[in-house]
Amino acid sequence: MAHTSSPPTEAVQSLSNGVTVLTQKPPVLSVRKGETATMDCNLGTVTSTVYWYKQIPGGVPQFVLYFHYSSSSPTYGSGFSAPKFTSTHQSTKDYRLIISNVEEGDSAVYYCETWDSSAVSHKYFLTDHKTTEIFLPPPVLTVFPPSSAELQSNTASLVCLSSQSVPFADVSWLAAGSPVSSGISTSTAVQRPDQTYQISSSLTIQTSDWNMDKVYTCKVSLGSQTSEKTIKKSECPTE
């Protein structure tokens, strides 16, 4: 599936000692629930074992599995197993992580890593690249108007709540159809018991603009998918 972000064609981490470069791709992978996600890691000059890690926002990396081209099957970390997770190799340096029957809890950042057997004191990481993003049905958006107490001052706040979302959703605001660049405060994604995420974003507005019935839009983007919810004074119930 296409996505709206513009990442580099490859996610590359160059290592300071110049021994090897790990290449992981694609940098963003958008799949739907129930589908299969695959991502590749090239170990550069190293012929060794690949290690895969998973990290959700605000959490620590979890060891998924390690796999060597000479092995018949991967070795798994706690909580991970076949057939949900597996790994294959295309060569002694090219490995693939496969996640079957993708579900909400699989949405995360995945890292590949290896050891250089010629210098075991060095551990090589590929970091800071999002490689799997799980697409769900569009999030549920709710926009709350300013309180009556707020409207007694010169400024007030609109609050947009995005529920049943994924952690990498981008929230933005429009005022009368034009993008807003200031006065926005967006929370980090909070995981819910159903494994989806909730994101809250507030926009500070001028009370005079609200009273003039200006239209405000909360926009949530998930790759190529976009959900919007508008609000204006005349459409809000009076207290």
Image (cartoon, rainbow, N blue to C red):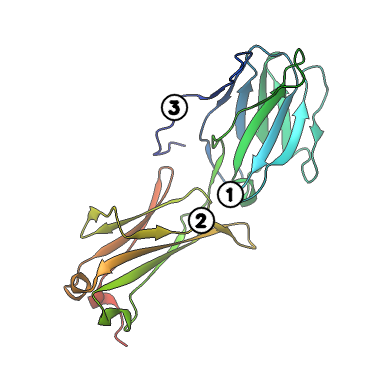
Q: Return the residue nearer the eye: 148 or 82.
A: 148
Whether residue 100 appears in this view of the structure is: no
SS label for mark 3: loop
* Residue 204, picture quadrant: bottom left
Of callouts 2 and 3, the N-terminal one:
3
Q: Amino acid at mark 1?
A: Pro
Residue contact between numbered discs 2 and 1, judged by CB atoms under 8 Å: yes
Task: Between residue 138 and residue 49, name the one nearer to us.
Answer: 49
Q: Which disc is residue 8 wearing?
A: 3
Quadrant of res 65: top right
Tell me what residue is drawn at x 73 percent, y 32 percent.
86
Ranked by sequence position, the earlier of labels 2 and 1 is: 1
Residue 149 versus residue 132 in the image, above or below:
below
**Viewer can see residue 129:** yes
At mark 2, the secondary structure is loop
Residue identified by numbered label 2: 188
On the image, the x and y values in percent for residue 5 come to: 40, 38
Q: Classify 10 Å Cα crowding around label 3: few (below 14), some (14-19), many (20 and above).
A: few
Residue 107 point in image, percent of width and height: 59, 46
Type of amino acid at the residue the image marks with label 2: Thr
Q: In the image, which is nearer the foreground, mark 2 or mark 3?
A: 2
Number of marks in the image?
3
How far apart marks 2 and 1 lie (CA) works out to 8 Å
Mark 2 and mark 3 residues within 8 Å of each other at the beta carbon: no
Q: How many angstroms separate mark 2 from mark 3 (CA)?
A: 25 Å
